[in-house]
Each structure stands twice: as C-alpha cells, then as structure tokens.
Amino acid sequence: MRTKVAIIGAGPAGLLLGQLLHTYGVDNLILERHTGEYVLDRIRAGLLEEGTVALLDEVGAGSRAHAEGLVHEGIELAFGGRRHRVDLKGATGKTVTIYGQTEVTLDLMNARRDAGLASIYEAADVTPLDFDTDHPRVSYVKDGATHEIACDFIAGCDGFHGISRASVKPSAIETFERIYPFGWLGILSDTPPVSHELIYSNHPRGFALCTMRSARRSRYYVQCPLEDHIDQWPDDRFWDELKRRLDDEAAGKLVTGPSIEKSIAPLRSFVAEPMRFGRMFLAGDAAHIVPPTGAKGLNLAASDAHYLARAFREYYDESSSAGIDHYSEKALSRVWKAVRFSWWMTSMLHKFPDTGTFGARIQLAELDYVTHSNAATTSLAENYVGLPY
Ligand code: RFL
Ligand code: PHB
C-alpha cells in the first residue's frame, strides 16, 4: 500500500490533519490503535477557540459545532468568596465555543467516512520506519498479519503515550517538563450547569472548575491529591467538596445528581523539541502537553494540524520545502506561548503544597490585579480566546 502522508493516531490532531490534507488534494491514510468507539468514549476537552471552529468549517465539519455549541463571551474567576467576570469579547472582540471533544471527533470521523477516506482502526504494533531517509514506511499488524505502508511523510498524531516520539533516537530530541503535585477529579452529570459561563475558583481547599457540555449536561472538576483513587470519591463527597470551593450564591444554586462519568487526570506541562525528524512530523499531544486550566490542549492540536497541512500543501502544490522546513519552529512558537499561559493559569488558581500562606496571598493579589486592571484582563483574555495563527 502507498500514500502521500501516513497519519498515526485518529484523535483530533490526526483526524483534522487528514481532512485538511484531503481538502488540499493530498491523499493520506490514518492508522489508529483502538476502535472508533473507544476514541469517542474519552471525555476530555470542552472549549474551542474561534480558530479551531474555523478549521472545522474549512473541512466542512463545523455545522454541528455552530448549531449545538454554546458561544461564551466571558468567564468568571472566583476568589475570596466572590466571583469576578472577565469579559473576553469586550477585551478581544472574540468568543469561545463550548463543544465537547467527543463531538469534534465524531464530526471529523463522519466527514472522513463521507469522503471515503481510508482509516485503519485496531492497527496493532504500528511502527514508523526509515523516516530519516527519503523512503519512510509504516508497518502495522491487523488481524494477525503484518502490513506495510510506503509514504512520502509520516505524521505522528498519536498522543502523549504514542509510538512516534518514542521512535526518535534520544540524542535527536530535547524535552522540557513540569509535573504538578495534584490532579483533577472530573465528573459529568445530566444536571443544568450552575452558571451559564465557566467558573474558575481559587479556594483555600483547592481549585474547582464549573463547566458544561450543554444546557442540560454539566462538567465539574476539583483539584485532588495525585494519589487519590475514584473509589474514594463517591458522588456525595464530590458534590460536597465542590460546594465548599464555590461562593455562597453558586453553592446554593448548584444542582446535583448522579455522575455519568468520573475520572482523575494528572496535570503536566511537556514540550518536545523539535517537532520534525527527517520525514516524520509530530502534532498535538504527541509533541506537547499542557495542564487543562487554560483549555489549550485540543486547540494546540488543531493549530499544529493547520501548520502541518499548509506545509504539505506547499510541498505538493508549489514544489517548495519552505513550509515543512519551518513547521517545527512555527508550531513551537505558538505552543510555548500556550504552555506559558496554561502554566500561569494553573499557578494562579491551584493550592500548592509547598508555597504556604505567602504563595496563597500572592495568588489573591494576582487575581485581584487580573480582574481589575484593563491591561492584565486583556492579556488573560487574549491568551484564553487563542493567539493568532
Ligand atoms: P489524542 O486525543 O490523545 O489522540 C491520539 C490518538 O492516537 C492513538 N494512538 C495510536 N494509534 C496507533 N498506534 C499507536 N502506537 C498509538 N498510540 C496512540 C490513540 O489511541 C488516540 O486515538 O491526541 P491529539 O489528537 O493530539 O489531541 C489532543 C487532545 O486530546 C488533548 O490535548 C485535550 O483533550 C486536552 N484537554 C483540553 N484541551 C482543550 O483544548 N480544551 C479543554 O477544555 C481541554 N480539557 C483536556 C481537557 C484534557 C483532559 N485530560 C483528561 C487530559 C480536560 C481534561 C480533563
Ligand atoms: C471542559 O469543559 O472540560 C473544560 C473547559 C475549560 C477548561 C478545562 C476543561 O479550562
């Protein structure tokens, strides 16, 4: 089998890259380790930048995000027992859209199926080969038989634990990492959201976030110790803890109900440099991870897919290597700014075990400043809605 671009991973990065390449007339094939149902079952991101929605539109997969997504013009920061609104639209002219990663993935999978493009799910032992030569290949095992795909390029869109980055020789890659000393316990419940905008809460008991998937489905998170197990968090304990971390008005209005999903995620900042190794390119979580406090992970996967698809288009349409030569530098410049913003939001909003009362007072001063200085509000808003491509 032969294709121009062999894409490893059918998460948002791989699926969006595949559709963009198809739109640009570049044939591609996706290899995914799991089933489509498994990929769709993972409850993850919920917030899309305007640029991400525009990319869905570009590939003809944006109509449901427009019809069903909730457009938000602001967020609320809660601290010191009160909530303070950040007017994103007023500060930047831009909005964000609440639309779950599950739905984005489903829309892209449907677009791919409708275009009749090849995806191989349940591909085992996927291995990128010879990417430091002009003739890269990818091998995989399906139904017990080994297959090989010859290609011009490999796109490693296989997430943080994927095989692509792991296939690079250690001397060719430099990594930067910060692991945070806490996790996020998240639940999904079919209850109306406590507020029509997101609430990010800094509280002496720890961080909490109120978000949503629709007018009838809520998503809530509380900061928890890394060692905790979900068995220690029956629904009642979760709701009780969440209420204690909200202001009185929100706590009083919170509608509780049974959880339909519950999970704990560790928080990490991670960047691998460069994002190109010969004829293999990394995109999305395969190259970088951010803590979810800035809602940037999925949006960075989308901007990487955009840069990479444009680079391949330039290569095939204009016989120019300039785009692929600059991909890593261009993508990393945007990535590092989102890594900085996500780290900053995380640092300002969480309870840290080692910074004590001094650190807590500094956080309150920063939150007060951010919500009362036009310059600081605009800086937060500009990063939150997404920096330009
Ligand atoms: P994914 O989604 O991990 O997809 C990678 C795919 O590759 C497959 N794969 C392989 N396939 C073949 N062979 C192999 N050897 C393979 N190894 C792996 C996997 O099965 C999978 O299907 O990476 P991608 O596409 O880069 O997308 C990244 C996003 O999923 C991620 O950044 C976001 O979910 C992060 N994130 C958020 N991002 C936002 O932009 N806004 C948010 O509001 C937001 N909230 C979140 C989040 C992540 C969270 N968790 C659980 C980490 C909230 C949470 C709680
Ligand atoms: C979500 O809706 O799951 C979500 C929203 C904003 C974040 C993180 C997660 O910062």
Image (spheres, rainbow, N blue to C red):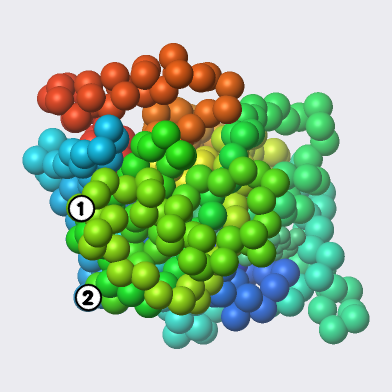
Position of 234 with respect to 67 (left or right) is right
Q: Nearer the viewer, residue 5 or 255?
A: 255
Q: Which quadrant of the figure has residue 272? A: top right
Position of 311 with respect to 144 (left or right) is left
Question: Residue at the spot x=57%, y=27% of the render?
Answer: 353
Quadrant including the C terminus: top left
Residue 211: x and y in percent read 34, 58
Mark 1 and mark 2 lie on one chain; the one further toward the N terminus is: 2
- On the rendering, which quadrant does ligand 1 occupy? bottom right
Quadrant including the N terminus: bottom right
Position of 382 with respect to 108 (left or right) is left
The residue at which mark 2 appears reads as 67
User: Which secondary structure, mark 2?
Assistant: helix
Name of the residue lying farthest toward the left: 90
Q: Is residue 140 above or below residue 81?
A: below
Q: Amino acid at mark 2?
A: Ala
Q: Residues within 10 Å of mark 2 (few under 14, many from 20)?
A: few
Question: Residue at the spot x=49%, y=60% of the render?
Answer: 238
Question: Residue at the spot x=68%, y=29% of the render?
Answer: 175
Q: Is residue 175 above or below residue 89?
A: above
Q: Is residue 355 above or below residue 79?
A: above
Check contact, mark 1 vs mark 2: CB within 8 A. Answer: no
Q: Amino acid at mark 1?
A: Glu
Q: Which quadrant of the figure has residue 240? A: bottom left
Answer whether residue 380 is visible to the viewer in this image. Answer: yes
The residue at which mark 1 appears reads as 249
